[in-house]
Image (cartoon, grey):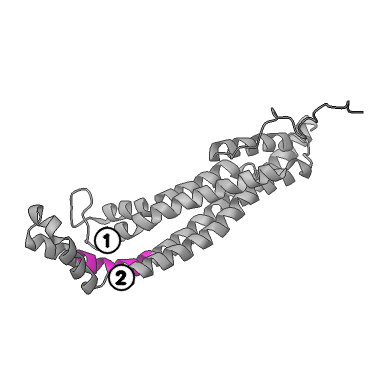
Amino acid sequence: MMERGARPGPLFSEGSPRSQPRSLITAISEIQELAIVEKMGRSLPEQIMLLDRSFAYAEVGVYGVALDALFSVIGIPLSIAVCWNLMPIFGSWTPGLFDKCIALFIGVGYGVVFNVMIGRTLGGCYYGKVCKRSIDLIYETMIYCNVFKILILFLAFHGIRNVLTPEFAHNIFDTLWPAFRPFMSTDSAVVFQDWMVNMREVMIVSSWWALATTLLSLLVPYFYFQRGEKRAAEEHRLNVLYDGY
């Protein structure tokens, strides 16, 4: 019974650790540790997936797709512009096939590399209920966020195309010409206005290129997960057969 005048203590310990957002490396490392335990024949209870861990794994997918969207909205139109000889790359206005491939990869490189890394590192961990659930949380979040990303990119690219009209380019230069006059000739101003207008058509192709590369890159983790599940099951079978666990 509490003594009279005594102050009640806090419901939770003030020194108890709080859940922190997990980085991609930390999340992958945790899942790899869980996979090792599962493969050794020690089944983990599904209750180990607490709510904070579930949200933390989902956040990994959100952050990855958010950065991909940021790079894509800038990189994809510029990479298409290089392929259409509207921008130079490596100092050349007429890039070859290799240069164009490099430009296209730069535009979507972050998303492709992110999906490949998720697939390669977690493919071998796709075994057991807990590990599968952990990986599915990341992958499903990536799918939902990529759908949202594509919608945003479509709206952004089509909106930019509607804005970049010849009249808009002319009005912009009329407004900013006093500031550009000291270091830009009239001929250079005309060339830049033409470039702005030509970039309109790039936006339509950019939106479809973003859609195609997103769909293809999302298939990469799925392929690794299916292959990894079969290999992990075979590894577990051999462990049981020869080592007795």
Front one among 167 and 63: 167
Give the number of marks.
Answer: 2
Front one among 82 and 66: 66
**Magenta region:** 195-206
Which amino acid type corresponds to the residue marked 2 in the rendered image?
A: Val
Magenta span dominant secondary structure: helix
Q: Residue furthest right?
A: 1
Question: Which quadrant would residue 173 be assigned to in this image?
Answer: bottom left
Indicate the position of residue 107 as horizontal and vertical percent values: 36, 54
Query: Mark 2 — residue?
Result: 163
Please say if 102 is above or below 240.
Answer: below
Indicate the position of residue 232 as horizontal and vertical percent values: 67, 42
Query: Mark 1 — residue?
Result: 81
For the point 8% across and 53% down, the residue is 182
Q: Is residue 140 left or right of residue 128?
A: left
Q: Is residue 28 left or right of residue 241?
A: left
> In the image, which is nearer the foreground, mark 2 or mark 1?
2
Front one among 220 and 245: 220
- The numbered dot on residue 21 is none
For the point 27% across and 69% down, the residue is 164
Q: Secondary structure at mark 1?
A: helix
The answer to whether residue 112 shows anywhere in this view is no
Label 1, residues with CA under 10 Å away: few <14, some 14-19, many ≥20: many
Indicate the position of residue 222 as horizontal and vertical percent values: 58, 54
Q: Secondary structure at mark 2?
A: helix
Earlier in the chain: of badge 2 and badge 1, it is 1
Which amino acid type corresponds to the residue marked 1 in the rendered image?
A: Ala
Q: Is residue 232 left or right of residue 1?
A: left
For the point 64% across and 42% down, the residue is 125
